[in-house]
Amino acid sequence: MVYEDAGISGKDIRHRPAMQQLLEDASKKKFHLVMSWKINRISRKLSDAIKIVETLEKYGIGYQSYSEPFESSTPAGKMQFQMMALVGEFERNTIAQNLKMGMRAKAMSGEWCGGIPPFGYCWVTMEGTENHGRRKSRLEVVEREAEAVRLMFQLYASGKGYKAIVGRINREGY
């Protein structure tokens, strides 16, 4: 069986349906061993990684990392597992910190940090900002859409609900 939470953060197990299914199947003893490529593939949070392995052990199920060989049944192997899980948590926290710093720097220089621009704005390339094949961009107000945004706020502030607001915006051709 393969349990895969593709595209879902490994920061905790609560929001990982495949991990929840794995733990449920473990309680039914549907397998004897769980193997992952690396320890940080089961979790990037030390306490969750330990909890997962302890849960597996409770049901007589072993855990093995394919690329990080250690003997999980020995005290030294358990320490090695915990150290590798701790490194995974450290890496995740470092990446998150660096990402926040980079986004803050972009925002401070006037760049747009998000994906698709919000309604009422469009991307504008900042002149002379090409860096490694990437151009910096900022947001610029699209006046026609901005009129609609102002109207939406005005209607909302006057007590209108979303259906009434959408109906009015559509009737006015936005």
Image (cartoon, grey):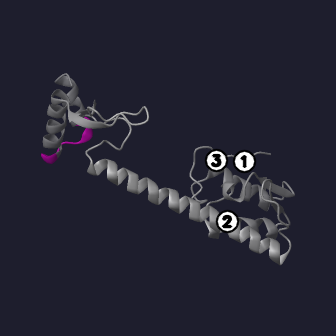
Which sits earlier in the primary sequence, circle 1 or circle 2? Answer: 1
Q: Which mark is residue 3?
A: 1
> What residue would you read off at disc 2?
85
Near-viewer residue (16 or 106)? 106
Residue 9 as seen in the image, left or right of residue 73? left
Callouts 1 and 3 close, C-beta under 8 Å: yes
User: How far from the left and from the top, in percent, is residue 28?
Assistant: 81, 58
Residue 163 painted magenta: yes
Callouts 1 and 2 close, C-beta under 8 Å: no
Distance (Cα) linking label 1 and label 3:
7 Å
Q: Residues within 10 Å of mark 2 (few under 14, many from 20)?
A: many
Q: Secondary structure at mark 1?
A: loop
User: How far from the left and from the top, in percent, is residue 101?
Assistant: 39, 56
At horizontal 69% and vertical 57% (from top left) the residue drawn is 42
Which sits earlier in the primary sequence, circle 2 or circle 3? Answer: 3
Q: Which residues are magenta?
A: 157-164
Distance (Cα) linking label 2 and label 3:
18 Å
Near-viewer residue (134 or 155)? 134
At horizontal 58% and vertical 44% (from top left) the residue drawn is 7
The quarter in which the C terminus is drawn is top left
> What residue would you read off at disc 3?
5
2 vs 3, front mark:
2
Please state which amino acid type lies under the numbered disc 3: Asp
1 vs 2, front mark:
2
Residue 122 as seen in the image, left or right of residue 87? left
User: How far from the left and from the top, in percent, is residue 145?
Assistant: 20, 30
At horizontal 14% and vertical 38% (from top left) the residue drawn is 150
